[in-house]
Image: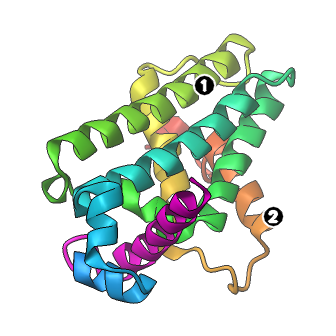
């Protein structure tokens, strides 16, 4: 079992790198086998297909991220500090697993029905975590009650996920500054010299 686990781990890590670099469609089973130093039959034995390999990757990644966010959601912190930690933790996960996190945003047309359903369920679970966090903030009086929690949660996730597009570990801004600014923007928006009535 130890050898099987090590083989699967190596295939998954190789596939993540190739999928992130060349895209899912642009990566073949042969590419993965060659880059991992294994045979094509190894991949079919452990995962049955390229979709099976992608499904294993998404399940592994989603369980890790979802568990981390759920852990934060259940802490004894107040709603505001808990929300800040939630966003910070999510951004940390993106920074550490930038390439692999991109796989959650593959076009639906690229995915098999089973992979697509698994991915949608994960996205829904994360959305619900943020809906609950926003509800807690509103009930505690930190924000106005959103007219639509789902839309508001999507807006929060939009800010977080955009970091996938441009964040670079060797960039000019320290990651702590990026996290603080993201949380500030989510909670307070852009500073304005005009009142909402002026718009």
In the shown orientation, is residue 110 left or right of residue 34? left
In x, y percent, where is residue 4? Answer: 51, 59
In x, y percent, where is residue 105? Answer: 34, 57
Query: According to the image, label 2 marks what residue?
Result: 176
Residue 11 painted magenta: yes
Residue pictured at 44% horizontal, 45% vertical: 59
Query: According to the image, label 1 marks what residue?
Result: 134
Whichever of callouts 1 and 2 sits on the residue coming sooner in the sequence is 1
Q: Is residue 55 visible?
A: yes
Around disc 1, counting alpha carbons within 10 Å, would you say few (fewer than 14), some (14 to 19), or many (20 or more)? many
Q: Main secondary structure of the magenta part?
A: helix
Q: Disc 1 vs disc 2: Cβ atoms closer than 8 Å?
A: no
In x, y percent, where is residue 162? Answer: 48, 61
Q: Which residues are magenta?
A: 1-27
Mark 1 to mark 2 CA distance (whole Å): 22 Å
In the shown orientation, is residue 133 left or right of residue 177? left
Q: Secondary structure at mark 2?
A: helix
Residue pictured at 73% horizontal, 49% vertical: 88
User: Nearest the camera: 153 or 18?
Assistant: 18
């Amino acid at each position: 079992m130890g050898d099987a686990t090590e083989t699967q781990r190596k295939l998954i890590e190789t596939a993540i790198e190739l999928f992130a670099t060349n895209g899912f469609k642009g990566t073949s089973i042969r590419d993965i086998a060659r880059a991992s130093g294994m045979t094509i039959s190894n991949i079919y034995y452990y995962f049955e297909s390229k979709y099976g390999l992608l499904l294993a990757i998404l399940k592994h990644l989603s369980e890790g991220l979802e568990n981390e966010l759920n852990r934060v959601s259940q802490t004894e912190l107040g709603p505001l500090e808990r929300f800040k930690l939630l966003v910070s933790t999510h951004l940390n996960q993106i920074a550490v697993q930038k390439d692999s996190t991109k796989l959650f945003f593959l076009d639906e047309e690229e995915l098999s029905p089973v992979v697509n359903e698994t991915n949608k369920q994960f996205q829904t679970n994360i959305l619900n975590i943020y809906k609950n966090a926003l509800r807690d903030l509103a009930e505690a009086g930190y924000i106005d009650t959103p007219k639509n929690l789902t839309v508001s949660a999507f807006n929060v996730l939009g800010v977080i996920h955009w970091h996938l597009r441009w964040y670079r570990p060797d960039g000019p801004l320290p990651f702590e500054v990026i996290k603080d600014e993201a949380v500030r923007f989510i909670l307070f928006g852009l500073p304005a010299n005009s009142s909402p009535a002026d718009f």
